[in-house]
Amino acid sequence: MHLYKNIKNFLFDQNYFISIWDKYLHIYEFTDILKLTEEEIALQLENFKLLVKGSDFRILKLTKNEILASGNILEMRFIS
């Protein structure tokens, strides 16, 4: 378990963390949800906005600063 905690601390000791795998999108340390639909997710992060477009988005986990969604990701854009 010690190795797991070290890796987690390394990965999450950032201003933000975005990962994509298969049909999953994980974002850590966003500040606000701007839009959340089945086709679009827009989030405000500390220094930019993140816009994700696709289809069939489903929220699997949502906390104050973390989101895990599944769906078909077609486009991802950073807006400063």
Image (cartoon, rainbow, N blue to C red):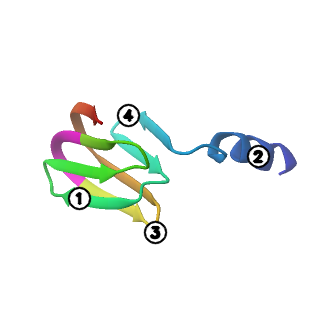
Residue with the mark numbered 2: 4
Mark 3–mark 4 Cα distance, whole angstroms, equals 24 Å
Which amino acid type corresponds to the residue marked 4 in the rendered image? Asp
Q: Which mark is residue 64?
A: 3
Asked if the residue at tag 3 contacts the one at tag 1, i.e. Cβ–Cβ closer than 8 Å, the answer is no
As drawn, the residue found furthest toward the right would be 2
Which amino acid type corresponds to the residue marked 1 in the rendered image? Leu
* Magenta residues (range): 52-57
Q: Residues within 10 Å of mark 4 (few under 14, many from 20)?
A: few
Mark 2–mark 1 Cα distance, whole angstroms, equals 32 Å
Nearer the observer: mark 2 or 4; the answer is: 2
Residue with the mark numbered 1: 34
Mark 3–mark 2 Cα distance, whole angstroms, equals 23 Å
Q: Nearer the viewer, residue 43 or 56?
A: 43
Nearer the observer: mark 3 or 4; the answer is: 3
Picture quarter with the C terminus: top left
- Element under disc 2: helix
- Is 5 placed left or right of 62 in the picture? right
- Element under disc 3: loop
Specify which label sits upstream in the sequence, 3 or 2.
Answer: 2
- Is 75 placed left or right of 30 in the picture? left
